[in-house]
Image: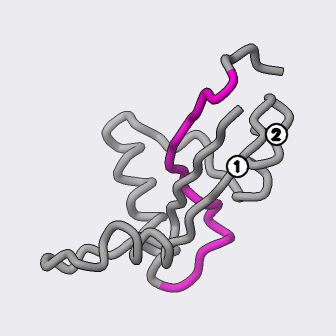
Amino acid sequence: MLSLARGSEIVFSFILPQQALSGIEADAAATAAAKSAEVGEPWLSRWDPADIAALLRRMGFSEISSLTPEQVQERYLKDRRDGLKARRGERLMRATT
């Protein structure tokens, strides 16, 4: 259990497990993981959203939300002119005490 002030918040992104991806997203994630490892930054953890939410609850966070790629696209990227799209293999999560 954490000892944080009420209202403390954490926001982070995480990569989904390889088996949760398919097609081009699975290929892109595998390539990115290999390239990161080559430069000394291996991906040590990959999480299922439900598993990481359960861990955060056990740590004492009570309000947990995760944004899907579709929600990220709508909220942050829809008006971009450069074609940037939310990645299916990455999620954003927010948790507060």
* Range drawn in magenta: 6-23
Where is the N terminus found, in terms of image quarters? Answer: top right
Q: Residue at x 35, y 44 (%)?
A: 38
Marks 2/1 in contact by CB < 8 Å: the verdict is yes
Q: Which mark is residue 6?
A: none
Q: Which mark is residue 57?
A: 2
Q: Residue at x 50, y 73 (%)?
A: 71
Q: Position of residue 76 (x, y in %)?
A: 34, 66
Circle 2: residue type: Arg
Circle 1: residue type: Ile
Is 77 magenta? The answer is no
The residue positioned farthest toward the top in the image shown:
3
Q: Residue at x 40, y 37 (%)?
A: 41
Q: Is residue 45 left or right of residue 27?
A: right
- Earlier-in-chain disc, 2 versus 1: 2
Q: Is mark 2 on a helix, strand or loop?
A: helix
Q: Residue 28 lies in what quarter of the image?
A: bottom left
